[in-house]
């Protein structure tokens, strides 16, 4: 406040000057005054945040305030982000356990508080990434405190974000760091597969780096590292069905390197376990087609290992490209037939049919089930998946018919925002408005219980109602989807977001607010007064802080744009603090 009074005094003093100097100084001082006033507002938010007793709530508040303050006072912003990042760390005893885990340790699913810590840590790094060197410092701190798995996961996540933002160089760097830290975990491999759908050359470069790194790591069945690595390697060579079918296959360099890796790996096993090759026969056979096409010089070595890997009476035929495809098709057809012949079809078979887009057979198999609750769960799944597929194909009417049958909020939030997004893309306001109202009405009466995980998957991996509110999340996604086309409608949905937030059972103490704060930022640009009023109507302190901070971020970005425009006009550049 003293700074504000001093600046006002300086503004009064400038009135004694004349001509253009008076106008220029007045503009500069007015701009500086607006910046100081906004900084004071953001600082007031930070004072409010001190009342948040829970560490993760405090951490998220600091991260959002830091985002708003980035262009106003970057030093203070970075201080807040460091404090926020450290607040996401578990107790020292748990940190020691994480640091002591060797490379190859079997991963364990994140539980409630760990998921929250991870999400807030991700958000802190997202804000910090505006200065990549600073974000690197925080990520390194996390690796030092939390061990190799954190380093692997965090860098893989940063790679995914960087690739989405078009920074391929950063994406490649983070993937390299991820696999260098812990190559036996799956996250980096999954990011590489995603990259392959849009940039085959970069994906191939990263696969080659992965193959080089994995050669240096001992793999074991005991900790499942052997199975994890072979699974991701197989997906590298044979892109899985869930990827975009237009994904090009790996290049010759990758196929050849894979063939060499398989032969080298199994020769090592042959030396250490002379009688152990039979257990690795299927892995060996995956190299036959790449060897034939890309590394014929390995044919002799392959055939020698193949002979040693046979069991008495085992089929000795080698795979062919056409034969492999036909075998997979026949295997699926046989399993479908067996399911129809059974009085009670296997749920995993039904889920497999749904994942393959075989919706007709999936529905027929669901009809054979005795359990009404199981029927309802799987019917919801098949309707949701088919609606998503139809939306992707641009068949909005058909997708909408299936969307109307959805009863669970988790399904609705996955389908309707995508449909509305298609309407917005085609600039069809009637379409968007119709589906917005349908979605809002369905969400209000929807079943909010989380989906049942497949057999064998612990229920603890599914977020609880205190971690995820699908109604609140769905409304936020709908408002964000329609905002580019119809601001009034988006603001109306924002009112529904606020009402849902005030009703929600989310545990904000875990740093959960249930909506994307950038919704308030984008709507403030269209109607600041109404958006600010919506934020003020939020009853939970953390949610209000996040929403108001997003509005302040918009105001700060507008000030920064005005300053940059003035600098360009005047041919000057002001150094940021």
Image (cartoon, rainbow, N blue to C red):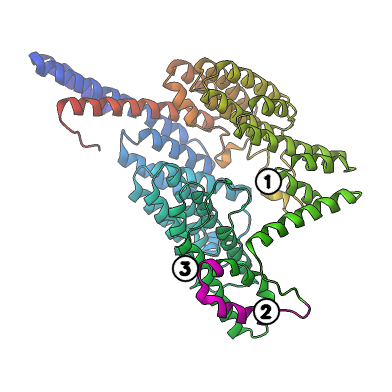
Q: Please tell me in which quadrant of the rendered image residue 233 appears.
A: bottom right
Dot 3 surroundings within 10 Å: few (below 14), some, or many (20 or more)? some
**Residue 213: assigned label:** 3
State the residue at coordinates (66%, 43%): 463
Q: Furthest residue to the left? A: 18
Q: Is residue 301 rendered magenta in the image?
A: yes
Taking the image as shown, residue 473 lies to the left or right of residue 120, namely right
Label 2: element kind: helix
Position of residue 482 relative to residue 119, above or below, is: above
Marks 2 and 1, how far apart in space? 41 Å
Q: Counting other residues with Cα less than 10 Å from the Cα at mark 2, is it few (<14), some (14-19), or many (20 or more)?
A: many
Looking at the figure, which quarter contains the C terminus? top left
Q: Which residue is labeled 2 in the image?
A: 309
Q: Which residue is mark 1?
A: 462
Q: Which residues are magenta?
A: 292-313
In the image, what residue occupies the spot 78% across and 37% down? 379
Q: Earlier in the sequence, mark 2 or mark 1?
A: 2
The span from disc 2 to disc 3 (Cα, nearest Å) is 26 Å
- Work out whether residue 61 can be spotted: yes
Helix, strand or loop for the magenta stretch, by majority: helix
């Amino acid at each position: 406040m003293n700074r504000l009074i001093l600046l006002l005094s300086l503004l009064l003093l400038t009135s004694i000057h004349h001509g253009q100097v008076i106008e220029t100084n007045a503009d500069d001082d007015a701009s500086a005054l607006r910046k100081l006033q906004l900084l004071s507002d953001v600082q007031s938010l930070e004072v409010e945040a001190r009342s948040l007793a829970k560490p993760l709530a405090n951490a998220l508040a600091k991260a959002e305030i830091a985002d708003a303050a980035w262009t106003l006072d970057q030093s203070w912003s970075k201080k807040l982000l460091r404090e926020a990042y450290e607040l996401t760390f578990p107790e020292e005893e748990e940190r020691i356990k994480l640091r002591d885990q060797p490379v190859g340790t079997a991963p364990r699913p994140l539980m409630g508080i760990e998921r929250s810590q991870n999400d807030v840590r991700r958000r802190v790094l997202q804000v910090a990434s505006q200065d990549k060197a600073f974000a690197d410092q925080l990520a390194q701190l996390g690796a030092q405190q939390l061990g190799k798995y954190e380093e692997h996961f965090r860098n893989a996540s940063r790679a995914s974000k960087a690739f989405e933002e078009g920074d391929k160089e950063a994406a490649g760097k983070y993937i390299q760091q991820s696999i260098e830290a812990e190559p036996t975990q799956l996250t980096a491999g999954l990011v590489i597969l995603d990259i392959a759908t849009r940039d085959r050359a970069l994906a191939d470069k990263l696969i080659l780096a992965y193959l080089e790194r994995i050669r240096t790591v001992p793999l074991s069945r005991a900790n499942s590292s052997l199975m994890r690595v072979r699974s991701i390697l197989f997906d590298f060579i044979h892109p899985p069905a869930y990827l975009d079918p237009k994904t090009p296959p790996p290049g010759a360099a990758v196929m050849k390197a894979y063939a060499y890796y398989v032969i080298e790996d199994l020769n090592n096993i042959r030396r250490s376990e002379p009688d152990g090759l039979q257990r690795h026969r299927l892995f060996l056979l995956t190299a036959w087609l790449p060897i034939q096409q890309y590394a014929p010089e390995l044919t002799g070595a392959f055939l020698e290992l193949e002979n040693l890997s046979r069991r008495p009476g085992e089929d000795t035929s080698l795979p062919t490209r056409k034969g492999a495809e036909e075998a997979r098709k026949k295997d699926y057809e046989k399993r479908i037939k067996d399911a129809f012949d059974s009085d009670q079809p296997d749920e995993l078979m039904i889920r497999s049919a749904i994942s393959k887009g075989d919706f007709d057979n999936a529905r027929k198999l669901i009809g054979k089930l005795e359990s009404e609750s199981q029927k309802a769960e799987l019917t919801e799944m098949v309707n949701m998946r088919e609606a998503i597929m139809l939306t992707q194909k641009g068949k909005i009417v058909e997708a909408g018919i299936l969307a109307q049958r959805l009863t669970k909020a988790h399904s609705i939030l996955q389908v309707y925002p995508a449909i509305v997004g298609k309407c917005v893309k085609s600039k069809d306001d009637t379409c968007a408005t119709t589906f917005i109202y349908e979605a809002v009405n369905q969400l209000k009466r929807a079943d909010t219980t989380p989906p049942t995980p497949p057999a064998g998957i612990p229920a603890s991996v599914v977020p609880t109602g205190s971690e995820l509110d699908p109604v609140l999340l769905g409304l936020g996604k709908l408002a964000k989807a329609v905002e580019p086309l119809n601001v009034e409608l988006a603001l109306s949905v924002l009112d529904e977001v606020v009402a849902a937030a005030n009703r929600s059972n989310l545990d904000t103490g875990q740093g959960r607010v249930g909506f994307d704060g950038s919704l308030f930022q984008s709507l403030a640009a269209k109607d600041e007064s109404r958006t600010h009023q919506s934020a003020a109507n939020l009853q939970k302190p953390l949610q209000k802080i996040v929403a108001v901070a997003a509005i302040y971020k918009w105001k700060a970005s507008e000030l920064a744009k005005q300053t940059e425009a003035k600098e360009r006009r005047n041919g000057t550049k002001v150094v940021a603090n």
